[in-house]
């Protein structure tokens, strides 16, 4: 009886594992660049009011977000609270593939020899580009 119970448990575990493995599907993200996207870096005055409010809500922690209007796609990347004020965020890559937009940014320091004590900065970048109906992948 014990042997039959063990065999039953092993068979059921095997079936479960096979079902779990066959239910998984790897979706390949096609990263072959179709084209580089033209974009405009926007300050707060060039952004929709709702987007500015979102940025201010999220800026204390690192964040990545997209915002769509009927005409444009806005891509925003923030690096959270930083204890220095000589930082800039730059867009290093923004390109379209067959099924996605890929975004890569970097934080750089501005040539500055003085750092102010007890100053906190919230560096972020917002860019506006043509509206595409694909997902946005951040690197």
Image: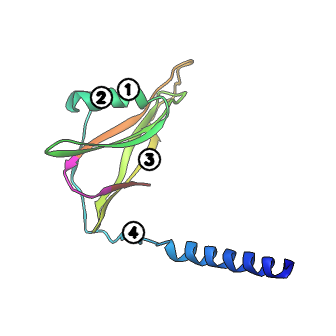
Q: Quarter of the image for the N terminus: give it.
A: bottom right
Whichever of labels 4 and 2 marks the residue nearer the N terminus, that label is: 4
Q: What is the C-alpha distance between the residues marked 1 and 3?
A: 20 Å
> Which labelled disc corresponds to residue 106?
3
Whichever of labels 1 and 4 marks the residue nearer the N terminus, that label is: 4
Residue visible at 52% across and 24% down in the picture: 114
- Image spot of residue 112 (x, y percent): 47, 30
Q: What is the C-alpha distance between the residues marked 4 and 3?
A: 23 Å
The residue that mark 4 highlights is 29
- Image spot of residue 92 (x, y percent): 37, 52
Residue 119 to residue 113: above or below: above
Horizontal relation, residue 126 to residue 88: left or right: left
Q: Quarter of the image for the C terminus: give it.
A: bottom left
Q: Is residue 32 magenta?
A: no
Classify 10 Å Cα crowding around label 3: few (below 14), some (14-19), many (20 and above): some
> Do the residues bearing badges 2 and 1 touch, measured as CB atoms within 8 Å?
yes
The residue that mark 2 highlights is 52
Q: What element carries label 3?
A: strand
Q: Is mark 1 on a helix, strand or loop?
A: helix
Residue extending farthest to the top is: 118
- Which corner quadrant of the image does residue 44 belong to? top left
């Amino acid at each position: 009886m014990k042997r039959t119970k063990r065999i039953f448990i092993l068979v059921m575990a095997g079936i479960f594992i096979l079902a779990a493995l066959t239910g998984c599907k790897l979706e390949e993200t096609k990263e072959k660049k179709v084209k580089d996207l033209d974009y405009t870096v926007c300050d707060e005055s060039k952004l929709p009011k709702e987007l500015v409010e979102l940025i201010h809500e999220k800026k204390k922690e690192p964040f990545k977000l997209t915002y769509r209007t009927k005409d444009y796609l806005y891509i925003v990347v923030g690096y959270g609270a930083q204890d220095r004020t000589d930082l800039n965020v730059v867009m290093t890559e923004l390109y379209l593939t067959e099924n996605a937009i890929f975004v890569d940014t970097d934080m750089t320091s501005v040539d500055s020899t003085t750092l102010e004590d007890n100053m906190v900065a919230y560096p972020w970048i917002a860019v506006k580009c043509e509206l595409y109906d694909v997902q946005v992948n951040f690197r």
